[in-house]
């Protein structure tokens, strides 16, 4: 039987899980922003990473069989999207029930009737929208988290209603979302994947034979390939899917890291510091890495590593979280936009407004002041991103500087504006010859490192330099 | 200064009795007519104070005692109310807060007002401002200031010694004669200095015992108790010589038995990490801070903090034959009066001599004279010796700046880092 290893990173903002095989290759990823209960968060991330592992094993299997064309791989991605939608739908149904329950507890009489009716309308309206976004792969750069997607849609709907009901509807939502988000839902993979295929069959059955000129599909190319083919594809894949669904993904060892690590029900030698895990993960993806910068939710870590990927020294922010992911989250809230929109907006800037504040909360006040003075939102955002990067640079300097190669990890690494300014300033300060690495899996670096420690059984068999 | 719960060895009882007697004498000083000198630990002129039969009070020691007794938060609050800002040295604020609250010392007895403020070390500029403030709190008090030149050039020149001796002769000694009403007695001073030399020999050997594996002592957390007598005015007394002889015997006994250091929770059973630490400890959470180390089997084999009251590693001893010159050299040799290169050299010597696995800095938020340049020192040591380094931050006596979880988080990473280093080293040994 093949052996797999699990790494769980319980961060301050999100919890991540990664499954690797015996070659240290990532085969499963799971992430959740549930944070009320670390044990649940770890389990949600773990289950997700196992589902994801099944899909990636399926893709690998297909790749090895010559009979299958590349479009099959695309099809599997569609199934995974539909699969995720079905998971989402289960939770949305739970939220519907919870919203009704909360409304009935909190309100009485006429207002209760009104609120419960509104809730039904909201759920009825947003369900198809969400379904479409998942099935058309429209989520794109947007957050994939249940809370973020639902609350955005819910807010849009509430804005359409009578203003008198705004407050009670928002209170109902706020009281309902957390328990639903924190509930662990276990799915039967096989059943759900069959349902997902059914959904896709419906979708393709409804698909017109030709693309109307006035409508753009995100999957035109694939549509042409799949059109009329989807039944054949899905039938011939079913056998493989069933095999994968029944495959025992045996986790031989696991390691926990991140802030919540002490709360994990793992034995003591299966708990590792996140500094070591981030460094080890980054070094695994980019073996020449000597300096790692990780900007996470509440902390920024500057880490120096040796040729083995082992930490020689590190520096973290103390006492203040300005310059971390939460800072961006706070700014996004202040501007009433989603976190994922910040970076792209900042990239549209014509100039960078100088941000003086080194404090997150004061930066909020400064932001409003600058808006009042007529500065453009994107220019202010550009300045804010630059301010974050400057703080990171100071931390890097204190940790011993930047050595070739430099790898940028953590949730903030996915922010294009942060990456842009960091690259600029690193080059200014440490030279143009430096290699700067950023991996799409940057947010999973800690859990990857943890999984790698799990595979090495923590002590034995360290990597070759 | 020892804590009852640490362990009840003979040396601790001796120290406790010595301190009890000193505070008793202080509380009755106004009745007995003994004169009281307030002075600082770095570059302290204990021997001169003893020669004039006066009693010393160390405001820093009182502040750290207040920190350990959980009183510093309120004292600092009161000093802030009186106009001292958040960024001011927390020893100063704690001390001023204590005075504003009746100047009750660590034994619960009131400390007498000073008859003389003796500023014998000026490498810490804050000391000067501190006494300036005290002068206002005690109007009419006598002040003597001895300017100690910084070892900017990395050595003590004859001119620097002459400069200080001149000040001792023309400023400090006349002031002490005036306050005490006694004539300066050079023979008496020489006798006292002979005792200092003996104590210094003994304490050097005690701290050198960490060469053993396991180390019989913790040179930081227990070290701060060991330096007690030598730092609070007993250096130069027969009692101090007796104390250090007793402590030396106890430590030797541990070495012979192959025992590790004693902690508040008993002996360290397995010495897992040997560290050299730079910077003072945090006093407000001293026990918790220590536990973060002993729970991991980490033993501090040398620390720069235990050298603030005198650096004896390079052979300096008070010299009865050259009393004033050796007082001058002593002042200039205190740890914070060394330039950065000298501090690095000293730490390097400690790391090598005591075979440390790691080097750690506890950087003090409100103490610039200690903290400035620490990262630079850390980098040099890391590059030169290839030793794993760690950096944590806390404060002396302001409990607001001690974050247990932050420090624990960093120390966890640091210790795991050291563990990994050991694995690699073992693998490399097997390979070769």
Image (tube, rainbow, N blue to C red):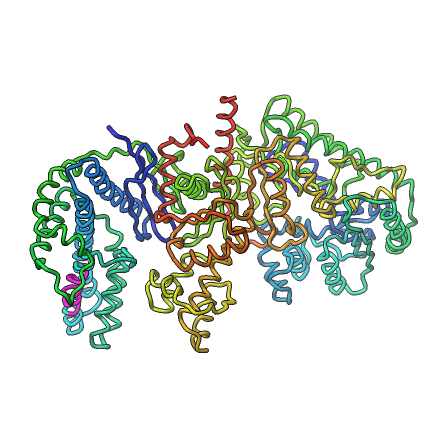
| Residue at horizontal 69 percent and vertical 31 percent from the top | B206
Q: Tell me if A96 is positioned left or right of B274 in this view.
A: left
Relative to residue B18, is residue B413 drawn left or right?
Answer: left
Query: Residue at point 67% right, 62% down?
Result: B100
Q: Position of residue A108 (x, y in %)?
A: 18, 70
**Nearer-the-camera pick, A417 or B90:** A417
State the extent of the magenta-drawn residues as a range. A118-130
A129 is within the stretch colored magenta: yes
A109 over A327 or under it: above or below? below
The foreground one among A205 and B381 is A205
Q: What residue do we see at 72% from left, 30% from top?
A: B205
Q: Report how many numbered discs are placed on residues in the image.
A: 0
Picture quadrant where residue B196 is located: top right
Q: Magenta part mainly helix, strand or loop?
A: helix
- Seen in the picture, residue A464 relative to A314 is either above or below; the reply is above
Image quadrant occupied by the N terminus of chain B: top right
Up/down of B178 relative to B224, above or below: below
Is residue A414 depicted above or below A287 in this figure?
below
Q: In percent of the image, x 23 and y 77: which residue is there?
A: A164
- x and y percent of residue B129 in the render? 73, 60
- Give the x, y percent position of residue A452: 37, 36
Q: Quadrant of residue A460?
A: top left
Q: Is residue B5 magenta?
A: no
């Amino acid at each position: 039987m093949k052996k797999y290893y699990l790494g769980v990173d319980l961060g301050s903002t999100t919890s991540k899980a990664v499954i690797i095989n015996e070659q240290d290759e990532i085969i499963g990823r799971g992430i959740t922003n549930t944070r009320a209960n670390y044990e649940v968060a770890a389990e949600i991330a773990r289950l997700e990473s196992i589902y994801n592992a099944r899909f990636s094993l399926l893709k690998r299997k297909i790749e090895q069989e010559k009979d299958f064309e590349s479009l099959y791989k695309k099809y599997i991605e569609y199934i995974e999207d539909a699969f995720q939608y079905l998971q989402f739908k289960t939770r949305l149904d739970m939220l519907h029930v919870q919203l009704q329950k909360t409304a009935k507890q909190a309100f009485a009489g006429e207002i209760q009737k009104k609120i419960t009716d509104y809730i039904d309308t909201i759920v009825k309206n947003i369900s198809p929208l969400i379904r479409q976004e998942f099935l058309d792969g429209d989520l794109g750069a947007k957050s994939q988290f249940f809370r973020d997607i639902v609350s955005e849609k819910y807010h849009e709907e509430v804005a359409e209603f009578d203003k008198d009901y705004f407050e009670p509807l928002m209170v109902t939502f706020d009281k309902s979302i957390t328990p639903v988000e924190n509930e662990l839902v276990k799915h039967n993979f096989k059943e759900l994947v069959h349902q997902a295929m059914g959904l896709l069959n419906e979708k393709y059955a409804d698909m017109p034979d030709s693309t109307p000129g006035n409508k753009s599909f995100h999957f035109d190319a694939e549509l042409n390939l799949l059109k009329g083919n989807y039944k054949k594809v899905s039938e011939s894949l079913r056998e493989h899917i069933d095999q994968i669904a029944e495959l025992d993904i045996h986790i031989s060892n696991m390691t926990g890291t991140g802030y919540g690590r002490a709360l994990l029900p793992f034995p003591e030698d299966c708990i590792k510091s996140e500094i070591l895990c981030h460094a080890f993960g980054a070094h695994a993806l980019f073996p020449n890495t000597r300096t790692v910068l990780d900007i996470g939710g509440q902390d920024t870590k500057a880490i120096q590593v040796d040729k083995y990927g082992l930490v020689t020294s590190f520096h973290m922010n103390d006492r203040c979280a300005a310059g971390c992911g939460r800072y961006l989250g706070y700014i996004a809230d202040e501007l009433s936009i989603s976190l994922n929109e910040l970076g792209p907006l900042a990239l549209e800037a014509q100039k960078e407004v100088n941000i003086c504040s080194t404090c997150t909360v004061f930066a909020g006040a400064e932001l409003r002041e600058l808006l009042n003075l007529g500065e453009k939102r994107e220019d202010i955002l550009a300045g804010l991103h630059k301010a974050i990067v400057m703080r990171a640079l100071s931390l890097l300097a204190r940790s011993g500087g930047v050595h070739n190669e430099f790898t940028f990890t953590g949730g903030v690494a996915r922010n294009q504006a942060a990456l842009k300014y960091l690259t600029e300033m690193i080059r200014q300060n440490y030279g143009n010859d430096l290699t700067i690495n950023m991996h799409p899996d940057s947010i999973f670096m800690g859990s990857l490192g943890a999984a790698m420690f799990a595979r090495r059984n923590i002590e034995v068999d360290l990597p070759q330099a | 200064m020892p804590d009852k719960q640490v362990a009840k060895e003979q040396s601790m009882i001796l120290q406790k009795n010595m301190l009890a007697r000193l505070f008793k004498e202080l509380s009755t000083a106004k009745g007995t007519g003994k004169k009281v000198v307030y002075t600082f630990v770095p570059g302290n002129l204990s021997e001169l104070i003893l020669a004039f039969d006066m009693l010393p009070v160390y405001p820093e020691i009182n502040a750290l005692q207040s920190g350990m007794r959980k009183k510093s938060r309120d004292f600092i609050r009161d000093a802030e109310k009186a106009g001292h800002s958040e960024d001011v040295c927390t020893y100063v604020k704690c001390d001023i807060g204590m005075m504003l609250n009746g100047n009750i010392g660590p034994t619960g007895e009131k400390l007498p007002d000073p008859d003389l403020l003796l500023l014998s070390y000026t490498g810490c500029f804050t000391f000067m401002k501190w006494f300036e403030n005290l002068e206002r709190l005690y109007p009419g008090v006598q002040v003597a200031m001895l300017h100690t030149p910084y070892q900017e050039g990395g050595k003590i020149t004859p001119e620097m010694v002459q400069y200080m001796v001149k000040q001792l002769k023309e400023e400090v000694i006349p002031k002490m004669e005036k306050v005490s009403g006694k004539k300066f007695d050079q023979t008496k001073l020489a006798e006292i200095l002979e005792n200092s030399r003996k104590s210094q020999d003994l304490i050097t050997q005690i701290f050198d015992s960490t060469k053993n594996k396991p180390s019989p002592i913790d040179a930081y957390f227990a070290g701060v108790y060991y330096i007690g007598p030598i730092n609070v005015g007993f250096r130069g007394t027969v009692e101090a010589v007796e104390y250090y002889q007793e402590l030396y015997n106890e430590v030797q006994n541990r070495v012979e038995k192959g025992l590790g250091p004693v902690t508040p929770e008993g002996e360290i059973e397995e010495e897992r990490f040997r560290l050299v630490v730079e910077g003072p400890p945090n006093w407000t959470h001293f026990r918790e801070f220590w536990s973060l180390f002993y729970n991991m089997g980490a033993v501090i084999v040398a620390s720069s903090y235990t050298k603030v009251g005198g650096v004896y590693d390079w052979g300096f001893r008070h010299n009865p034959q050259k009393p004033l010159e050796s007082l001058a050299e002593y002042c200039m040799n205190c740890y914070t009066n060394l330039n950065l290169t000298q501090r690095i050299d000293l730490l390097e010597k400690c790391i090598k001599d005591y075979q440390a696995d790691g080097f750690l800095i506890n950087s003090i938020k409100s103490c610039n004279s200690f903290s400035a340049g620490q990262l630079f020192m850390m980098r040099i040591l890391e590059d030169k010796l290839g030793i794993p380094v760690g950096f944590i931050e806390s404060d002396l006596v302001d409990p607001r700046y001690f974050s247990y979880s932050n420090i624990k988080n960093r120390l966890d990473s640091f210790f795991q880092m050291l563990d990994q280093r050991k694995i690699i080293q073992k693998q490399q040994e097997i390979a070769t």
